[in-house]
Image: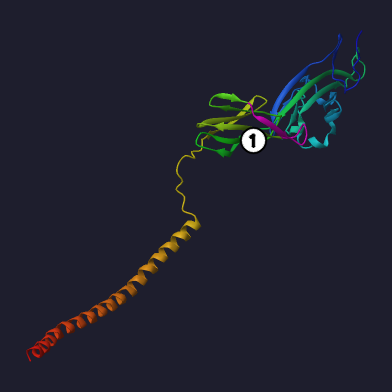
Amino acid sequence: MQQACTTVLVPFVCSSTGCAQEKKVVKSKVGEEVSLPCCYKIPSSESLQNYRVYWQMNITDVVLAYSGGKKIDEHLRYVNRTKLDFENLTLWISGVEILDSGTYQCVVQSLQSSPDKPGSHFLCVELVTLFVTADFSKPSIEREVTASSCESTEMVVRCSSHGGFPKPKIYGVLNNVSVVLNTTWESESSLSPYNVTGTLWLNVTKDLNFTCFAEYDGFLRSTSLLLAKANDCIVSSALPSYNVITASSIIIITFLLAVILAAKYLPRHACSHCSKNQASAGEDAKEIMSTPHSCKVTCEMSTL
């Protein structure tokens, strides 16, 4: 039993034996110009005036349509971005966006009657899937040291990339050994650019080479960073604290004051001591000199 294809919204290729479905895949990047092939080429002896051509997206939205050689419909989102090749009916889309991703249909009808096919009739339907990608930024690696000792350094390593499509895979390689990252994604919708971040907790006992990869639709971007172990065993050469400087200054000032006071009062005390010694010596001398005189008087009195 033959299946009749009577609507431009049905994704079938119809022939005398029935309807068959065929799908092609076209890939492009954001901002590029892409061509979507159709299933029919107009003979050189004819023109577009003899045909009706519909390019539709996701079956329901007409992107561009011609009938009898004239444009009869165009989607607002594709205005000034699409054009039709009048020979092979290829649809060209410029300034491709992520939202352009989806399944497109090229439906071709003949407007000419023939003895076996009176009136307009279907010629073919082509299904084309457009897949648009957007490049991710080069991964950025940041590390945060959470604890450190002579033996090891604990750190959190974060690798992030943004602005790409489709949803990426992010992973790391640590000294040529693959490691799994705790990954989070951010996107406004399923057809919006993604931001991705991978997190890794490490206890580093020696310097390590870390490489982060962002993979999406066969593309790969990477960045490397040396994770150096912190050396906290070296004696710190930092300047003394404010309290130490203050205490040292007080000690020095006190010492200088002591020296000044000693220099001022010690000579005076020494002179006073010398005067007392001189007075004592004078009295002793007088006493010695007076002793013979007394003896002389005593002796004379004894003689008498």
In this view, 52 is above or below 146:
above
Question: Which residue, as the protein is rendered here, is positioned at the far left?
Answer: 303
What range is drawn magenta here? 180-193
Q: Position of residue 25 (x, y in %)?
A: 73, 21
Question: Which residue, as the protein is rendered here, is positioned at the far bottom?
Answer: 304
**Residue 277 located left or right of residue 192:** left
Question: In terms of secondary structure, where does tag 1 sit?
Answer: strand
The image quarter containing residue 23 is top right
Q: Amino acid at mark 1?
A: Ser
- In this rendered view, identify the residue nearer to me: 173 or 162: 173
- The verdict on residue 286 being magenta is no
- The verdict on residue 189 being magenta is yes
In this view, 294 is above or below 170:
below
Which residue matches tag 1?
160
Q: Quadrant of the C terminus?
A: bottom left
Mark 1, Cα crowd under 10 Å, few <14 / some 14-19 / many 20+, is: many
Q: Position of residue 89 (x, y in %)?
A: 77, 24
Q: Position of residue 282 (x, y in %)?
A: 20, 82
